[in-house]
């Protein structure tokens, strides 16, 4: 009798359970937002929307039953790691959580490629957060299984940018035609690096509000420029707030500063309060990837334009969609 189980270490030509092997996402890594086009984004958002409906209706279901996610975080995380865990479990799969690498073999000096090779022997997909730019791309070079970048230092955070864009689409009904103002730590914030790049697929206008030393890196501005997107830099929010449709606030990233006194110096200079919100449009949203430290006063939370807590829920549906897609089930 012939066996349907292929030999170890050979890719299976057979996909059980009517999988979507021909999908553009099956088996693929998610490393950078530059890998997506608008058609694919619409598709991801449609699947995310279906995930939202399914969660609202039944909570959890068995789409990824038997699949295992390895969740490997070399940097702190609350939302990204727990939303991936929730996403996997709501889809009926399970998770190997490695949230504290100090208890793993990494402290014995194991290299990232070896850790990745290990985890892919036990899991079907790996979510990786790591302090070095390019770490997910490196991991993907060694892995046969899909790698999902959950933040590579100050590089990219593609799943965050996808959920940010989904938030804008769901909250304001469209992306084209909007003015998006990014404020805070644009130099070290990987979420704004990914989002600025992703937004170049749309007809939008970008404003950057930050002190000189935390401005958007020149390389990203050049990429945005090359796509013909209008962008402008400011040190103050006041001139651009009245025209802003999406105010995307970020935390000044203390952990990325070599000189802590520099961070102290900047603290408090870019804060959104209920007073600030008086100059904003009635129909606009305030977003933040979170965690928030001091950059948005808690009083703003009551404002219906404050979308940051809804934004993190959208992240669950986006991550459910992505997991289902890379595992060939959507
Ligand atoms: C962000 C991150 O880790 O890049 N958080 C997140 O993933 N939602 C933003 C931050 O740490 O400031």
Image (cartoon, helix red, strand yellow):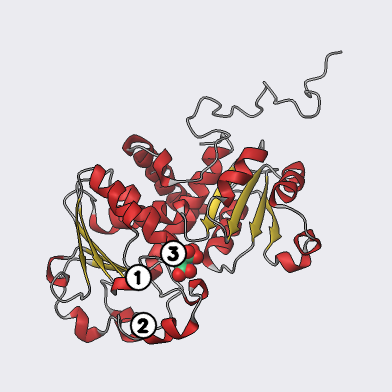
Above or below, comparing residue 97 to residue 327 in the picture: below
The residue pinned by badge 2 equals 266
Q: Earlier in the sequence, mark 3 or mark 2?
A: 2
Above or below 133: residue 288: below
- Front of the two marks 1 and 3: 1
> Which corner quadrant of the image does residue 12 belong to?
top right
| Crowd rating for badge 2 (residues with CA inside 10 Å; few <14, some 14–19, many 20+) | some
Q: Residue at x 43, y 51 (%)?
A: 53
Alpha-carbon span between mark 2 and mark 1 = 9 Å
- Give whichever of discs 1 and 3 has the lower sequence position: 1
Q: Residue furthest right?
A: 1
Q: How many marks?
A: 3
Mark identifier at residue 214 = 1
Tell me the SS state at disc 1. helix
Q: Position of residue 30 (x, y in %)?
A: 51, 44
Q: Residue furthest top?
A: 1
């Amino acid at each position: 009798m012939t066996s349907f189980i292929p030999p170890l270490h050979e890719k299976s030509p057979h996909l059980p359970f009517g999988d979507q092997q021909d999908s553009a996402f099956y088996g693929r890594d998610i490393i950078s937002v530059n890998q997506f086009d608008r058609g694919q984004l619409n598709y991801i958002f449609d699947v995310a929307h279906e995930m939202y409906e399914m969660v609202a209706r039944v909570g959890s279901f068995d789409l990824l039953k038997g699949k295992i996610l390895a969740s490997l975080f070399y940097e702190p995380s609350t939302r990204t790691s727990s939303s991936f865990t929730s996403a996997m479990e709501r889809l009926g799969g399970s998770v190997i959580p490695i949230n504290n690498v100090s208890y793993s073999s990494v402290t014995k000096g194991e290299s990232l490629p070896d850790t990745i090779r290990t985890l892919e022997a036990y899991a079907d997909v790996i979510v990786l957060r790591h302090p070095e730019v390019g770490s997910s791309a490196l991991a993907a070079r060694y892995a046969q299984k899909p790698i999902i970048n959950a933040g590579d230092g100050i590089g990219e955070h593609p799943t965050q940018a996808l959920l940010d864009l989904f938030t804008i689409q769901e909250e304001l009904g469209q992306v084209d035609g909007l003015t998006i103002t990014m404020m805070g730590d644009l130099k070290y914030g990987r979420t704004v690096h990914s989002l600025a790049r992703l937004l170049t697929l749309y007809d939008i206008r970008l404003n950057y509000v930050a002190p000189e030393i935390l401005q958007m890196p020149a390389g990203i501005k050049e990429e945005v420029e090359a796509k013909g997107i209008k962008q402008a830099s400011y040190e103050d929010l006041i001139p651009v707030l009245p025209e802003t449709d999406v105010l995307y606030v970020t935390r000044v990233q203390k952990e990325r500063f070599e000189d802590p006194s520099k961070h102290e110096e900047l603290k408090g200079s870019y804060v959104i309060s209920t007073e600030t919100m008086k100059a904003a449009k009635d129909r606009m949203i305030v977003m933040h990837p979170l965690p928030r430290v001091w950059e948005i006063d808690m009083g703003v939370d009551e404002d219906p334009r404050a979308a940051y807590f809804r934004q993190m829920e959208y992240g669950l549906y986006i991550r459910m969609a992505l997991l289902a897609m890379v595992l060939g089930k959507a």
